[in-house]
Structure formats: C-alpha cells, structure tokens
Amino acid sequence: MPLVIAESGNSAVEMFATRIDVQWDFKTNTGPVLFHYERVDWDRETKLVNTRNYERTIRQDITALIGGDYAITNPVTGEQLTEPGWKLMAMIKAATERVWEAEQEMALLVMREQWTNESSS
C-alpha cells in the first residue's frame, strides 16, 4: 500500500518508490537496495498527476529485507497474507531469469533471420 500523506475526495498526495535499484552481490547474497521515493499529488479517479517531485533515496541492505516477514494484501481477493522475506529475493531472481531467457530467444530469432537474409543474397 502506498504511503498516503494526505487525501481529500479523489485527490491524494502519496509517496511512491518509483525506482528500486537492487545491487546484489551474488557471491555473498548481500548488497544495498536503493528506494527512490517521489511525492505524487494525483487524482485517483482520473489518474491525472498534478505534481510529481523527487523526495529522497533510502538505502537498505538486502539481508535486512529478506530477513523479516511481510504483511501483504492479495490484489484480487483482498485476503491478508504474511510472507517470509526470502521469497522477495527468490521472486526477483526468477523474474531476472525469465527476462534473460526471453531476450536470448529473441536474439536467436533475429540472428537466424539475419543469417537467412545474408545466405539468400
């Protein structure tokens, strides 16, 4: 849930970490995570952003983030869940592998097409 600073009707001022940098040291499973926060004044109904300003960057170590538990809300059912922090790292790793594999498949298709075009010339 975003950090709500103020709200009135459909308008809200909220803090969002619009960029999160994970600087993972794969040898030690440590490293900093940088949360870049912005203060956003927006209309939730129309999605119109009135103002958006950088607020600050907060640094947290990966080990602290994966060491605890997180209370989360299922976006479909609204059910409250508690999940262990290690799942955060596991999900980031899984997403990283999926992105890499998809990009590798696309690169191979492009290379095959280029080779086919060069061979037929």
Image (spheres, rainbow, N blue to C red):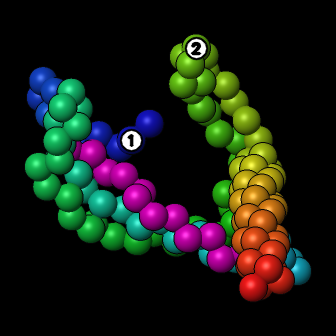
- x then y, percent, for residue 91: 75, 50
Which secondary structure type mostly characterizes the magenta part of the structure?
A: strand
Q: Is residue 96 left or right of residue 44?
A: right
Using the image as rendered, state which of residue 114 and residue 48 is in the foreground: 114
* Residues rendered magenta in the picture: 13-25
- x then y, percent, for residue 38: 30, 60
- Which of the labelled discs sits on residue 2, or is there none? 1
Give the quadrant of residue 63: bottom right
Q: Residue at x 58, y 14 (%)?
A: 77
Three-letter amino acid code at the position of disc 2? Thr
Q: Is residue 12 visible?
A: no
Q: Residue at x 27, y 68 (%)?
A: 54
In the structure shown, which secondary structural element does the residue marked by tag 1 occupy?
A: loop
Three-letter amino acid code at the position of disc 1? Pro
Give the quadrant of residue 10: top left
Q: Residue at x 55, y 70 (%)?
A: 21
In the structure shown, which secondary structural element does the residue marked by tag 2 occupy?
A: loop
42 shown above or below 56: above
Q: Residue at x 56, y 19 (%)?
A: 76
- The residues bearing labels 1 and 2 have C-alpha atoms spaced at a distance of 18 Å
Q: Is residue 41 magenta?
A: no
Of mark 1 and mark 2, the one earlier in the sequence is 1
Residue with the mark numbered 2: 77
- Which of the labelled discs sits on residue 119, or is there none? none
79 shown above or below 10: above
Using the image as rendered, state which of residue 67 and residue 35 is in the foreground: 35
Q: Is residue 111 left or right of residue 56?
A: right
Circle nearer the viewer, 1 or 2: 2
Q: Is residue 27 visible?
A: yes
